[in-house]
Image (cartoon, rainbow, N blue to C red):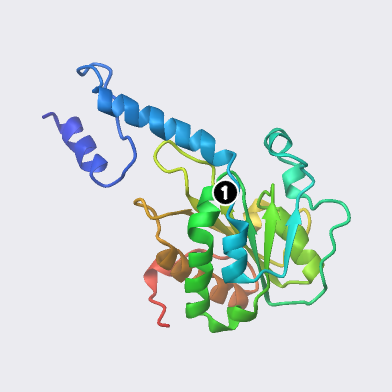
């Protein structure tokens, strides 16, 4: 085995991703071709599923469930800008919490069903004061819709858990975005992101909650997120 092949084989053992397709090698085995087609179909199907809102509602007891300005899944996919805005007439109470948690379907509703409640549950165990943090569900939503929700609630900080764009390896990956002082028009550079949250070789919900707990604690101490808050959570251990 050549040196490059050896290194690629080593890399392949570290990830469930397809590391290399060698055009000069022998024909692709049928089993791998079928697996690729199955993963491609799963990624496409994931976009059009609906989160198990009823199951999430039983566990998380949300304050509200809102929708974006996108009136259908088709419109949501064609007009990303509409997914960042609350539907006209949306009303939320001005309760001024320290943190609001928004759970948004995004591009992978199955990720929300599979991992969102577990992340919140582990996060509350690490930071018990978050038990009182209001949770809102958002349909046909993009990350920035959390800014408008937080603004209307009067929240100091918002955590958005959202289904990430499905891939050919994992179609149920969750992303988390933390924003200090969220307002309409907040730039992405003002957010901290924890991505690749799933149980198929990614960041598991307990590990993601540890990282988010560290970021929330530091955001409070520094009164900032994004480029002003470098993620050093891997250097510390949070004790519950």
**Count of numbered marks:** 1
Do we see residue 11 in this rendering? yes
Q: Residue at x 57, y 62 (%)?
A: 55
Figure check: 123 above or below 14: below
Q: Quadrant location of the C terminus? A: bottom left
* Residue in front for this viewpoint, 71 or 222: 71
In x, y percent, where is residue 97? 72, 77
Find residue 42 and report its horizontal and vertical position in percent: 46, 36
Q: 77 left or right of 68? A: left
Give the quarter of the figure containing the N terminus: top left
Q: Residue at x 64, y 71 (%)?
A: 61
Reading the image, the residue beneath label 1 is: 109
- Residue 215: x and y, percent? 53, 69
Q: Position of residue 74 (x, y in %)?
A: 70, 34
Residue at screen point 28% across, 28% down? 32
Above or below, 159 against 32 in this view is: below
Residue at the extreme left of the image, as rendered: 1
The residue lying toward the viewer, choosing from 44 and 207, is 44
């Amino acid at each position: 085995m050549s040196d490059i092949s050896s290194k690629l084989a080593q890399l392949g053992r570290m990830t469930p991703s397809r590391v290399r397709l060698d055009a000069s090698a022998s024909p692709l085995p049928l089993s791998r071709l079928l697996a690729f087609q199955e993963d491609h179909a799963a990624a496409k199907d994931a976009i059009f599923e609906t989160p198990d809102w009823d199951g999430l509602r039983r566990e998380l007891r949300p304050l509200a469930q809102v929708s974006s300005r996108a009136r259908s899944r088709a419109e949501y996919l064609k007009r990303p800008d509409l997914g960042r805005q609350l539907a006209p007439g949306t009303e939320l109470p001005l309760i001024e919490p320290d943190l609001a948690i928004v759970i948004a379907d995004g591009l992978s509703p199955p990720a929300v069903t599979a991992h969102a409640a577990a992340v919140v549950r582990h996060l509350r165990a690490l930071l018990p004061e978050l038990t009182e943090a209001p949770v809102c569900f958002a349909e046909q939503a993009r990350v920035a819709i959390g800014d408008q929700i937080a603004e209307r609630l009067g929240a100091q900080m918002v955590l958005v858990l959202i289904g990430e764009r499905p891939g050919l390896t994992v179609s149920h990956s969750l992303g988390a975005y933390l924003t200090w002082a969220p307002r309409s028009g907040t730039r992405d550079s003002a957010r901290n992101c924890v991505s690749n949250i799933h149980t198929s070789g990614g960041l598991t919900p307990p590990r993601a909650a540890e990282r988010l707990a560290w970021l929330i604690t530091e955001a409070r101490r520094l009164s900032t997120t994004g480029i002003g808050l470098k993620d050093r959570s891997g250097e510390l251990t949070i004790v519950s």
